[in-house]
Image (cartoon, helix red, strand yellow):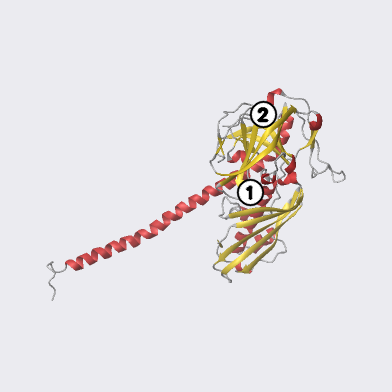
Amino acid sequence: MRDSGQPVGTETRRGRRRAARRLRRRRRTPWLLIAAGIVLVAAVGAWQLYATVWTTHSQSAGRALVHHFLKDNAIGAPLRSPTWSQKPSSGSGGVSTASLATCSASGSGSASGAGTAASASGSSAAGTAVHGLLEIPALGVVAPVEQGTGDGVLAVAVGHDPYSVWPGKTGNAVLLAHDVSYFSTIDQLKSGDTIRYVTPCTTYDFQVSSHAIVTSGSPVYDTTTPSVTLVTCWPTDALWFTPDRYLVTAAEVTKAPTGSSQDTKKTYLTVSSPPSVPVPSALASQGVTLATYSLPMGTFTLVGSPTRSWAQTTSPLLVDGSAVQAFIAGVRALTENHLDWWHAIAPGVKAPAPLVGANNPGYETATDVTEHANGAAATGVTLTDTVSVTGGGHPGRYVMTVRTTVHGRTMTISSWTMSPS
């Protein structure tokens, strides 16, 4: 016997309204998921755009910077590289040598800066010309220095923070570079080690005085005497953004006219072209770079016996770019069951069964890269990650190890293993 004090059917109508609200919420859920997916795709696209800008600028400009600086400022252009029958000078790795000539006052590269505290974040407008050369003898570094710290500059050069003075002026000159290129080992510098800044007119020597680890965006304060501070990401093997920065500060101890005494002959290393990957045109049209394929990147390690001067340029990262291209091309060829494509980029290598005809794998860990090098050239690259595979004949979770080998100017896949995880 119902006696709720409400008209008959009220509870039924309320129940229907509640059911309708639940239905509307269920209908909104897919749209919310779609919106979240769009945001995620946009974030991945932004990351891919960064990688594309970095690689494109490196390939188009990096190889000529040092040469043009020496030539345009009358310091003396690099001469020809030694042939295989000639023995290069110690530690040169077979690179060109250049004689420093007389000073050209038109390009001293010592324009005054703002003289205020700069930032360790590394984000400002890009420059357009090489202002000088940064040399770190203990690390074998010879790097062009450009104005600005944007992506276009740091892709090929050391960037000068425009809110700081230029090296040699009273104050603290702030210079930034990518952690896995020119500044990959600045944490190994010791107190008293030399950092040298070369302009067409004057060469300035600085001695290392301190190290520090700070958060991105922390101020780098001015000094009352000429000094330089080198800034890079910490840790120095990270292939992506990190919240910390590593700083090395050095104080000026001497300066002399460029081209005098021990500076009459120097060795300069230009960035070398990366090896090409024989990707079939039909496969290349699908996109085989980070601009068209989402691949989480982890750490970068350089092993073997590379010359220190080559290791400190952007050349190793350009080789890494070729290896990533081969990796992506391999995944696309396998998952699309195009074994003709596979054999073009992995001649004589057995196709890994779990990926043949499967869906695109899910990357459960970042892809770590180990590059093997000898002298001033890379010999191969190893990429390792953990993936989940669906579809195909062998779904599951695998540890995937891909090895590439460089033959002359070409890189191909030499092995591809997948071990159940």
Q: Nearer the viewer, residue 397 or 3?
A: 3
Which corner quadrant of the image does residue 283 belong to?
bottom right
Compare marks 2 and 1 and give the one earlier in the sequence: 2
| Residue 323: x %, y % from top left | 66, 54
The residues bearing labels 2 and 1 have C-alpha atoms spaced at a distance of 27 Å
Among all residues in the image, which is located at the extreme bottom? 1
| Residue 179: x %, y % from top left | 63, 46
* Residue on which the image places disc 2: 168
* Residue on which the image places disc 1: 236
Q: Is residue 359 left or right of residue 413?
A: left
Give the number of marks. Answer: 2
Mark 1, other Cα within 10 Å: few <14 / some 14–19 / many ≥20: many
- 137 up-or-down from 292: above or below: above
| Residue 385: x %, y % from top left | 61, 61
Residue 339 shows in the view: yes
User: What secondary structure is marked by label 2?
Assistant: loop
Which corner quadrant of the image does residue 225 belong to?
top right
Q: Is residue 35 left or right of residue 140?
A: left
Label 1 is placed on what type of residue?
Thr
| Residue 387: x %, y % from top left | 58, 63
